[in-house]
């Protein structure tokens, strides 16, 4: 990522203060207007010291009757403040000489903080202090509390924001009818109401961000995100790409020799993609479908459309196992058509790899599958017209850009991105508004539903016995080791120990092990042995999360399931249920379960629909984590919440289309207000 230039100041803000403000992404006075309160504090009334309730914030006023630096149990500043009803202790564990001066004996002060019982009696730890004169009036409205950073106090922020509100133009940039229909105030009224709530403002509505002023700001924020993404979409459509006519020769031949018929959803998605490929602007389509919905065959048909037109197509996958799985499938389907698929991975022998690269460079080979090895410099695809990226959220923007730069004749290749993590509708409408989306919402016939069981780790022996019994009847099983994100070495050690323990416990069964540190050819050999039925049990880390397809494997055990995310659990569970035998996924969990752990396991236990699981995942984790690497360069939402504010997404989307068509100047000004020239179009 390029380094941000040093923060430049502006009138009244020097370089040092500008540097602190830049940490909050405030780089000009206009940004201060949109730096909205995190919460509000009620300083409109005083509470008598004796009436202050422990555990609740309160404001008290009194005279400092004692103040000293105490050295035990640790160095701290302790003051006593007295009013007519009693005495309260104020304590600072970290303090400056200025605070000590502020609390001089005889000084009248107002303290705001949470009261609690302490060693010295009722106390406030690190309260906010304001010296006052006797009889000084109280604020008439709630006091805003802003997000801040080290060295930047609330008083400074409030002063800067008030100055910005007085000097920055707060023009209304939305059509009058847009706010009227939704019953929302104008922009100037909304920002002033949030920075300086009226004395009669509903504190609860402000706190939970349901106040009309909050909704007005959220609508504009969602609108700006839509504008940014739609502009990116329109900019791409203005570029040139190779038009790949749907000739139907190779695609029809592949369909004719498949041992299965496409589902309605597959046929629909294939037709949408074929139409996009025939256009002379680059396709930018996301193909999403649940685990096992058959995305690879749809991608294969798209790749053949490029080949029919004399061009090349490449498929990039995030892991060696997934890439090899795709290569094997494609090679198997396309060999009868006389087509060979290049296999590019970091693990191939140098001579084989160079021979393959030469055949791609010369145009002799038209199809390639690989990991990120595909985007490395020596790989030349002179006729590349279609790039397919699987599990696209696992690649960063840079990696997808690198593949796109390899287009034929200097033109952009068409991009088809695939994801087995279904994207909830609200997320698709906001964070993915720059893509066309095709959905595979039905599973191929013959798939059996997977039964999910929750078992506490105290019953591990019963689970081992069940695995033993299943394998004795000719079935195969996966055993997934616990996820240990903090330490790859520890995760590897756990996997080896699990493998050794299961090998001993499952006497007479053939047990294999795959993990991230294995050499690629060893990994491939173990996977191939499991697929061929030469192993009964495969002990694995999450390297098998995607891309493994062994129809005879009907039992999945996941240890410490509470450590995994919902999307991961759903992906792992999807490795079974690929044949006609009844499939079971056993989730072993450790006690005590955290609230989030309990929620996740409940969702995965009760649901098999990936879209429902994704919606719940979004609710539990929030959009930031859900979107993952795609976020680089995306205007993220600071105030709007995709679940709570779902009703504003559709109006924002319609308004974005309207402004881009009818009032591009207003659209430009809105983007400038929120993004300040930092509009980062998501170009990948």
Image (tube, grey):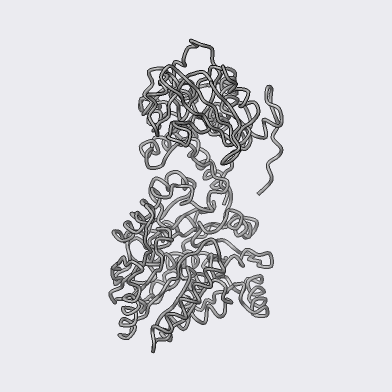
| Image-quadrant location for residue 316 | bottom right
Q: Is residue 339 visible?
A: yes
List the single residue furthest toward the bottom.
508
Q: Is residue 598 above or below residue 135?
A: below
Asked if residue 152 lies left or right of residue 505, the reply is right
Question: Where residue 279 sits: x, y (%)?
Answer: 50, 53
Asked if residue 356 lies left or right of residue 224, the reply is right
Q: Is residue 249 visible?
A: no
Question: Where residue 609 sits: x, y (%)?
Answer: 32, 59
Name the residue located 59 percent from the left edge and 63 percent from the top edge: 384
Q: Is residue 343 above or below residue 98?
A: below
Name the residue located 67 percent from the left edge and 80 percent from the top edge: 351
Q: Is residue 461 above or below residue 664?
A: below
Asked if residue 325 lies left or right of residue 400, the reply is left
Name the residue located 37 percent from the left edge and 64 percent from the top edge: 589
Question: Where residue 593 sits: x, y (%)?
Answer: 37, 57
| Image-quadrant location for residue 582 | bottom left
Q: Is residue 247 above or below residue 200?
A: below
List the single residue furthest toward the top.
135
Front residue of 146/273: it is 146
Question: Where residue 116 sits: x, y (%)?
Answer: 43, 34
């Amino acid at each position: 990522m390029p380094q941000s230039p040093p923060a430049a100041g502006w009138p009244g803000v020097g370089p040092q203060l500008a540097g602190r403000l830049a940490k909050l992404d405030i780089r000009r006075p206009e940004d201060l207007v949109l730096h909205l309160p995190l919460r509000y504090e009620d300083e409109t009334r005083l509470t008598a010291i004796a009436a202050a309730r422990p555990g609740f914030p309160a404001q008290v006023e009194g005279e400092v009757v004692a103040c000293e630096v105490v050295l035990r149990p640790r160095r701290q500043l302790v003051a006593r403040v007295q009013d007519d009803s009693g005495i309260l202790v104020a304590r600072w564990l970290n303090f400056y000489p200025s605070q000590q001066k502020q609390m001089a004996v005889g000084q009248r002060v107002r303290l705001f903080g949470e009261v609690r019982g302490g060693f010295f009696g009722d106390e406030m730890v690190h309260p906010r202090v304001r010296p006052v004169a006797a009889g000084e009036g109280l604020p008439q409205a709630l006091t805003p509390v802003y997000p801040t950073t080290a060295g930047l106090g609330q008083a400074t922020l409030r002063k800067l924001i008030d100055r910005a509100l007085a000097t920055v133009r707060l023009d209304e940039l939305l059509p009058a009818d847009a706010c009227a229909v939704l019953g929302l105030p104008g922009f100037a009224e909304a920002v002033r109401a949030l920075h300086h709530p009226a004395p009669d403002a509903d504190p609860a509505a402000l706190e939970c961000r349901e106040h009309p002023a909050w909704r007005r700001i959220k609508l504009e924020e969602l609108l700006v995100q839509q504008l940014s993404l739609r502009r990116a979409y329109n900019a791409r459509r203005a570029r040139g790409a190779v038009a790949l006519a749907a000739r139907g020769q190779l695609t029809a031949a592949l369909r004719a020799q498949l041992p299965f018929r496409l589902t309605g959803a597959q046929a629909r998605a294939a037709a949408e993609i074929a139409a996009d490929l025939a256009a002379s602007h680059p396709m930018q389509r996301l193909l999403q479908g649940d685990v096992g919905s058959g995305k690879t065959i749809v991608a294969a048909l798209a790749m053949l459309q490029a080949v029919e037109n004399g061009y090349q197509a490449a498929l990039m996958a995030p892991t060696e196992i997934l890439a090899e799985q795709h290569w094997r499938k494609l090679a198997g389907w396309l060999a009868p058509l006389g087509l060979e698929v290049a296999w590019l991975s970091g693990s191939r022998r140098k001579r084989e790899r160079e021979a393959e690269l030469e055949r791609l460079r010369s145009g002799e080979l038209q199809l390639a599958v690989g990991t990120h090895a595909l985007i490395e410099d020596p790989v030349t695809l002179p006729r590349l017209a279609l790039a397919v990226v699987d599990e696209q959220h696992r690649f960063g923007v840079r990696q997808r850009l690198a593949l796109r730069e390899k287009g034929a004749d200097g033109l952009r290749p068409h991009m088809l991105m695939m994801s087995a993590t279904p994207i909830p509708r609200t997320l698709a409408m906001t964070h993915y508004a720059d893509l066309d989306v095709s959905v595979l919402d039905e599973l191929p016939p013959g798939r059996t539903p997977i039964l999910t069981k929750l078992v506490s780790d105290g019953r591990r022996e019963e689970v081992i016995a069940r695995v033993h019994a299943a394998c004795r009847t000719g079935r195969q099983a996966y055993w997934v080791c616990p996820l240990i994100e903090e330490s790859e070495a520890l995760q590897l050690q756990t996997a080896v120990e699990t493998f050794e323990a299961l090998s001993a416990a499952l006497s007479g069964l053939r047990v294999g092990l795959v993990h991230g540190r294995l050499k690629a050819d060893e990994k491939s050999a173990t996977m191939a042995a499991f697929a061929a039925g030469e192993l009964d049990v495969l002990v694995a880390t999450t390297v098998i999360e995607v891309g493994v397809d062994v129809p005879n494997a009907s039992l999945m055990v996941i240890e410490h399931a509470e450590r995994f995310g919902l999307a991961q659990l759903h992906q792992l569970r999807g490795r079974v249920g690929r044949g006609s035998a009844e499939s079971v996924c056993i989730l072993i969990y450790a006690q005590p379960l955290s609230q989030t752990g309990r929620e996740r396991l409940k969702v995965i236990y009760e649901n098999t629909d990936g879209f429902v699981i994704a919606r719940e995942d979004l609710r539990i984790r929030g959009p930031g984590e859900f979107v993952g690497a795609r976020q680089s360069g995306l205007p993220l939402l600071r105030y709007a919440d995709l679940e709570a504010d779902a009703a504003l997404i559709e109006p924002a989307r319609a308004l974005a289309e309207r402004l881009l068509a009818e009032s591009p100047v207003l659209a430009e000004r809105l983007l400038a207000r929120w993004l300040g020239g930092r509009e980062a179009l998501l170009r990948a």
